[in-house]
Amino acid sequence: MIDDLYKDSHERMETALSVLEEDLMGIRTGRASPALVEKLLVEYYGSDLPLIQLASISVPEPRQLMIRPFDASSLKAIEKAILASELGLTPSNDGKVVRLNLPPLTEERRRDLARMVSRRLEECRVAIRNIRRDTMKDLKELEKEKLISEDDLNLAEDKLTTLTEKMVERVGEIGTRKEREIMEF
């Protein structure tokens, strides 16, 4: 019973970490990456679809993305979605593909991106702590219902606290790596 709760908490914390990593992939660094735009929502025939479902995205040059729509009629919608996004990029199209040139980041923009990363890291830390809190509550309920002993409760709490600290540490490592990427020239 305790092991099941621990395992569930571990899985939920791992999920929070993978969501964070996916989220951070969409934050621009100094080089082009398809992850920057693939989750961008594009209005296509009345519904919002991720760009990855509407086009192939490639990196022909280190500072350029090329978006080739599967359906040429979606070109204008893709351009509109890119302009409306918070990427701050201006698309150019030649009738067949959309090209995004990524200018070098200014120092101010790098700091803004680093702050954005910090916010996302803190959101992930809060999510991990909430998972810990919920599991602790469940453990205390089990102890209250006499399904586990007080010693079992204390051991489980210690184990859960150790897991939480490890996960929060991993969040910090992920953040350090991303901030280093952003600050690279």
Image (cartoon, rainbow, N blue to C red):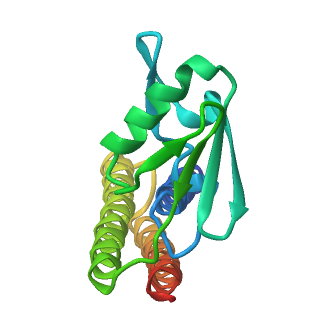
**Left or right of 128, for residue 50:** right
Q: Quadrant of residue 79?
A: top left
Residue in the image at 70% along x and 58% along y: 59
Whether residue 1 is visible to the viewer of this picture, yes or no, is no
Q: Which residue is more in the foreground, 30 or 79?
A: 79
**Left or right of 59, for residue 20:** left
Query: Compared with residue 114, is residue 137 higher up or lower down, i.e. above or below?
Result: above
| Number of residue marks | 0
Q: Which residue is more in the foreground, 34 or 78?
A: 78
Query: Compared with residue 175, is residue 65 higher up or lower down, i.e. above or below?
Result: above
Q: Which residue is more in the foreground, 32 or 50?
A: 32
Query: Compared with residue 52, is residue 15 higher up or lower down, i.e. above or below?
Result: below
**Residue 113: image location, x then y, percent:** 34, 72
Whether residue 61 is visible to the viewer of this picture, yes or no, is yes
Residue in the image at 59% along x and 68% along y: 63
Residue in the image at 65% along x and 32% along y: 96
Looking at this view, name the residue that lies furthest to the top: 45
**Residue 12: image location, x then y, percent:** 51, 52
Residue in the image at 26% along x and 82% along y: 108
**Left or right of 92, for residue 70:** right
Query: Compared with residue 172, is residue 33 higher up or lower down, i.e. above or below?
Result: above
